[in-house]
């Protein structure tokens, strides 16, 4: 299966279990892998046989910067559901939601959740 990658999409949202996350908000990054057949798009130079990256970005932005969820797992599930619903050519998608600065003690680069959903 062919793949489209959208890497390190950056947003500011209010997701989290802790009150300060819901009030102050924090940065989120999202990585996407979209699986679909790109043969016709490539052969015919036809965007209608692919997926518009700008539309994908807007969908993800509306979710991550929209209604708060407690868990990044819920954010990832919502992104996957919306993308699969909006883009009929999409066979499956892998969604990785990254919290670079979660309010937990310790030394780490980030925490993340990754899911894969398909038809």
Image: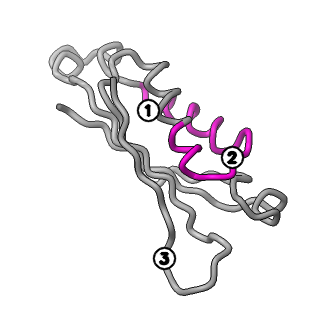
Query: Which residue is tagged 1?
Result: 53
Image: 75 above or below 119? below
Location of mark 3 (residue): 109
Q: CA distance from mark 3 to mark 2?
A: 22 Å
> In the displayed structure, does residue 36 sit left or right of residue 48?
left
Q: How is the image coloured?
A: one colour
**In this rendering, the label closer to the viewer, 1 or 2:** 2
| Magenta stretch bounds | 52-77
Q: Which disc is residue 69 wearing? A: 2
- Is 52 left or right of 22, judged from the image as shown? left
* SS assignment at label 2: loop
Across and down, in percent, residue 53 comes to 43, 32
**Is residue 29 positioned above or below 65 on the image?**
below
Q: Earlier in the sequence, mark 1 or mark 2?
A: 1
Disc 3 residue crowd, few under 14, some 14–19, many 20+, Cα 10 Å? few
Q: Are marks 3 and 1 in contact (CB under 8 Å)?
A: no
Question: Which tag is nearer the camera, tag 3 or tag 1?
Answer: 3
Contact check, label 1 and label 2, Cβ < 8 Å: no
Decide which of tag 3 and tag 1 comes sooner along the chain: 1
Which secondary structure lies at badge 1?
helix
Residue 78, located in which quarter of the rendered image? top right
- Residue pictured at 20% horizontal, 32% vertical: 2
Marks 1/2: CA distance? 25 Å
Residue 107 position, x and y percent, is 53, 86
Where is residue 4? Give x, y as percent: 30, 37
Quadrant position of the C terminus in the picture:
top left
């Amino acid at each position: 299966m062919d793949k489209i990658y959208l890497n390190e999409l950056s947003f500011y949202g209010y997701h989290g279990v802790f009150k300060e996350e819901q009030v102050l908000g924090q940065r989120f990054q999202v990585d996407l892998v979209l699986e679909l057949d790109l043969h016709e798009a490539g052969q015919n130079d036809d965007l209608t046989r692919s997926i518009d990256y700008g539309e994908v970005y807007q969908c993800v932005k509306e979710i991550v910067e929209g209604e708060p969820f407690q868990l990044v797992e819920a954010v990832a599930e919502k992104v996957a559901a919306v993308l699969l619903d909006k883009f009929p050519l999409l066979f499956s998608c892998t969604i990785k939601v990254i919290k670079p600065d979660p309010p937990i003690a310790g030394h780490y680069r980030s925490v993340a959740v990754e899911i894969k959903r398909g038809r």
